Image (spheres, helix red, strand yellow):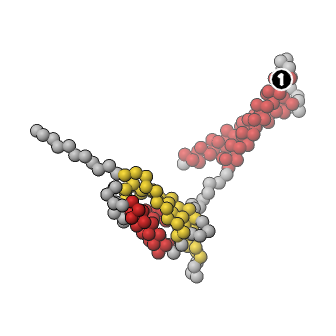
Amino acid sequence: MAKILDRLLLFLYSLSIGILSVTAILLLSGVIPDKYEISDGPAVYIAAISVAVILFLLSIRFFYISLRRDRASLPSVDQRTEYGDIQISMETIENLSLKAAGKVKGIRDLKSRIRVSQAGLEIMIRAVVDGEHSLPLLTTDVQRQVHDFVQETTGIPVADVSVYIANLTQAPSFKSRVE
């Protein structure tokens, strides 16, 4: 509801500023006769017309923004089968990759990003590890697990799975209390 109200206000604002700036341009250029004279000289006229033109251009931009449609469809991967079309959202593929990577022991705080390329899906996994396992083995296991799971579940070829190890988790240190 707030988004619709914001768009309505932006529409009204851009329309009113546009009308005022066109009126100012017409008055200052002499197209519409006025009974007031500005005695400061041509520099004031040029400055006033410049400001009116800039406001008019901004109002056109805001007017366009207030009327343009949002992308109604979320990004998805489309497939055609013998029975019809299938659309799988990118969010679904991200969640599938997170589910697969989460099965690997020693991996925590996962984030995923998906890109679609000519070769297939490119999956980027960001993870925090516990530091108790070999990083090359962990990353290879994550890559294999994500690749196989996403490809088997969606039927979409996975071209690349890259893993970025962001940090190590810190083991909580317990201090003994003596009473």
- 105, 23: nearer the viewer: 105
Single out the residue that lies furthest toward the bottom.
Answer: 82
Residue displayed at 52% across by 70% down: 158
Single out the residue that lies furthest toward the left.
Answer: 179
Q: In this rendering, would 11 be left or right of 140?
A: right
Instruction: Tell me where residue 25 sits by quadrant.
Output: top right
Secondary element type, mark 1: helix
Instruction: Tell me where residue 86 sits by quadrant.
Output: bottom right
Q: In this rendering, would 99 be left or right of 12?
A: left
Q: Is residue 40 above or below residue 128?
A: above
Residue displayed at 86% across by 20% down: 41
Instruction: Tell me where residue 76 sits by quadrant.
Output: bottom right
Residue 176 rendering spot, x and y as whole percentages: 17, 43
Whether residue 91 is visible to the viewer of this picture, yes or no, is: no
Whether residue 135 is visible to the viewer of this picture, yes or no, is: yes
Residue 121 rendering spot, x and y as whole percentages: 54, 67
- 53, 93: nearer the viewer: 93
Residue displayed at 27% across by 48% down: 172
> What number of labels is visible?
1
Q: How would you rate the neighbour count of disc 1 (Cα within 10 Å): few for under 14, some for 14-19, many for 20 or more?
A: few
Q: Which residue is mark 1?
A: 43
- 19, 176: nearer the viewer: 176
Q: Is residue 156 above or below residue 53?
A: below
Residue displayed at 51% across by 75% down: 155
Q: In this rendering, would 33 be left or right of 155?
A: right
Amino acid residing under circle 1: Ala
Residue 28 rendering spot, x and y as whole percentages: 84, 29
Quadrant holding the C terminus: top left
